[in-house]
Amino acid sequence: MEVDTVVSGSPFFIGSQSEWFWAMAQAIIVALSLLFIGQQIRLQSHANVLTALAGIQHQWTSPELVYARGLTCAHWKDQGPFFENAEETVCTFFENLGLYVEKQVVSQEIAWELYSYYVEHYWAMLEREIRDIRKENEDPTLYCHFQRLNAILRDYGLRRGVVPGDFSPARITRFRDYELKRVAEFREFQSTLSRS
């Protein structure tokens, strides 16, 4: 039986017997490159989420939306229809946020942590008017992402052990008072900044 022998004195990565070494080195380099590319994609994804969240938060605290939130709360009554530009602005914000959550631009967890309190209360405050607008316009899809966002965040809260309470007029009135106070504080802060 003949046995191939390695020529003594020649390194294992040179010569005809070195093909295995170069194939293995190439495979390692390709694997490391793929890991690096995966890490870059993951980092870019996180950067995109942060950019989206910054834009959403900027819009939420913009003077226009803060003003619309204040008007929406001021317009809210236990009875009687209302739906004006302010309410449309607030609903559009939540409609867009709902679309971002559905398309997984923003995770359910982040949306729940930052906006569930507002989503649930504004939905409870505006649901009747939204349903009336859908009937008037014969369009059942109006603000459907806002409605689904409310359901998604309530379900997420239940999975986290948070049981949603009832949204009685008294509870919505407390929310309205809280929100009106925050809006007034924000507007005062804005005017202080503009005087500086």
Image (cartoon, helix red, strand yellow):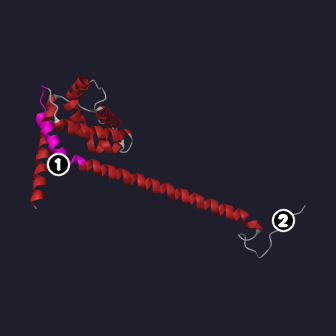
Tell which tag, 2 or 1, sits nearer the viewer.
1
In the drawing, does residue 133 fall left or right of residue 98?
left
Mark-to-mark CA distance, 2 and 1 = 82 Å
x, y percent for residue 54: 29, 52
The magenta stretch is 59-80
Q: Which residue in the structure is indicated by mark 1?
A: 63
Magenta span includes 73: yes
In the drawing, does residue 4 fall left or right of residue 34?
right
Q: Residue drawn at (29%, 50%), measured in percent from left and top?
A: 55
Q: Residue drawn at (42%, 55%), measured in percent from left and top?
A: 43
Q: Which residue in the structure is indicated by mark 2?
A: 4
Q: Residues within 10 Å of mark 1 (few under 14, many from 20)?
A: some
Mark found first going from the N terminus, 2 or 1: 2
Q: Quadrant of residue 160?
A: top left
Type of amino acid under label 2: Asp
**Residue 22 vertical position relative to residue 87 in the rendered view, above or below:** below
x, y percent for residue 69: 17, 41
- Disc 2 to disc 1: CB gap under 8 Å: no
Q: Which image quarter is the C terminus in?
A: bottom left
Type of amino acid under label 1: Pro
Magenta span includes 78: yes
**Residue 96 vertical position relative to residue 151 in the rendered view, above or below:** below
Overall secondary structure of the magenta section: helix
Does the rendering let one see residue 23? yes
Q: Residues within 10 Å of mark 2 (few under 14, many from 20)?
A: few
* Closer to us: 2 or 196: 196
**Residue 30 vertical position relative to residue 97 in the rendered view, above or below:** below
In the drawing, does residue 120 fall left or right of residue 17?
left
Q: Which image quarter is the N terminus in?
A: bottom right
Q: Secondary structure at mark 1?
A: helix
Q: Residue drawn at (34%, 39%), measured in percent from left and top?
A: 99
